[in-house]
Amino acid sequence: MNYILTALIVLGIIALIAAVVLYVCSKRFAVAEDPRIGEVAAVLPQANCGGCGFAGCAGLASAIVKAADNGSIEGLSCPVGGSEAMQKIASILGMTVNTGVPRIAVVRCQADCTKRKQIATYDGLDSCHAMNSCAMGETACGFGCLGCGDCAEACSFGGIKINPETGIPEIDPQLCTACGACAKACPRGIIELRPRGPKDHRLYVACMNKDRGPAAVKACDLSCIGCGKCAKECSFDAIAIENNLAYIDPEKCRMCRKCEKACPRHAIVSVNFPTPKPSTTAPTQTSTTSTSQP
């Protein structure tokens, strides 16, 4: 019995000494955290989506406070919280911030299985990355959407879904936060973050095919062939042709839609524009003069 009691006393003394040592070390080597980091983190949505370029909201909060100490937080933003969150953060730090242009993800491919010729059958892992590693996938277009849904799985907000009928991802403008997770997940880079546009109007080339004209025509019914007709129609120098593919610069585009009408392949997509009203002009009647035979 005395041995057990002695052992307990010894263990108690060792535990007490260890506790004292740990307490002293915690105070001696403590790293004081700037309380502003916690305040900034509380404003962030804690989605930890990585759209800001950091591993999570805590990393962004720390970077913002550090940047504030250096005099400016420009270039740092939370795509989920948006301008409202950044304005609150700027107020906490006693700074001003220029709110960026609201953006949204767009899918630069509109060709479902009826528009692209199927040349193979894929039987493997249900992943865009896996299918992309197998050359061109199932269709003759080596640049288009693969339809396995890696982008939808990467979205933490349910803002992108695969249409079961077309196999093409569709963006929900109400749920998309422009975090960029879907764009990073796409192995073919067909998802782009673009400005939402005035009145939510958008105009872009929904094609990524860089093949020459004949090959692009053969691969897809809606492919861009780089003919340049859209660029010739644009009065604002907003369209560039590179690698047999047209691209509309959202900073220069004035949404006149002349390019859309000029495209012979219907590769340019317009979103949320009002439907043109039917012409109410009455057809002109051609007057005819009858002559009687004598």
Image (cartoon, helix red, strand yellow):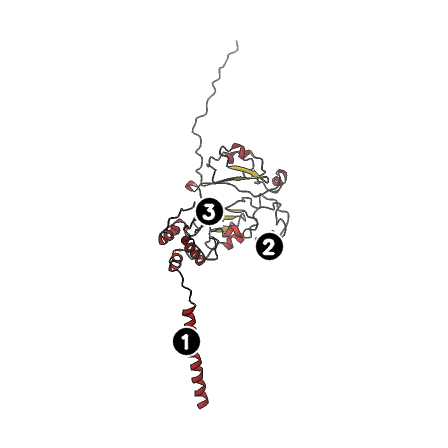
Specify which label sits upstream in the sequence, 1 or 2.
Answer: 1
Query: Front-most of 152 and 115?
Result: 152
Left or right of residue 167, residue 176 in this image: left
- Quadrant (top left, top right, bottom left, bottom right) of the N terminus: bottom left
At mark 3, the secondary structure is: strand
At mark 1, the secondary structure is: helix
State the CA–CA distance, disc 1 to disc 2.
56 Å
Residue 275 in picture, x, y percent from top left:
44, 37
The residue drawn where x is 42% and y is 81% is 13
Q: Which residue is mark 2?
A: 130
The residue drawn where x is 44% and y is 80% is 14
Residue 174 in picture, x, y percent from top left:
43, 49
Residue 239 seen: yes
Query: Front-most of 132 and 121?
Result: 132
Are the residues at dot 1 and dot 2 in contact (C-beta closer than 8 Å)?
no
Q: Nearer the viewer, mark 1 or mark 2?
A: 1
Specify which label sits upstream in the sequence, 3 or 2.
Answer: 3
Q: Which residue is mark 3?
A: 104
Identify residue type, mark 2: Ala
Q: Which residue is mark 1?
A: 20
Would you call the spot at circle 1 few (<14 residues within 10 Å), some (14-19), or many (20 or more)?
few
Would you call the spot at circle 2 few (<14 residues within 10 Å), some (14-19), or many (20 or more)?
some
Q: Nearer the viewer, mark 3 or mark 2?
A: 3
Residue 117 in picture, x, y percent from top left:
61, 44
Q: Nearer the viewer, mark 1 or mark 3?
A: 1
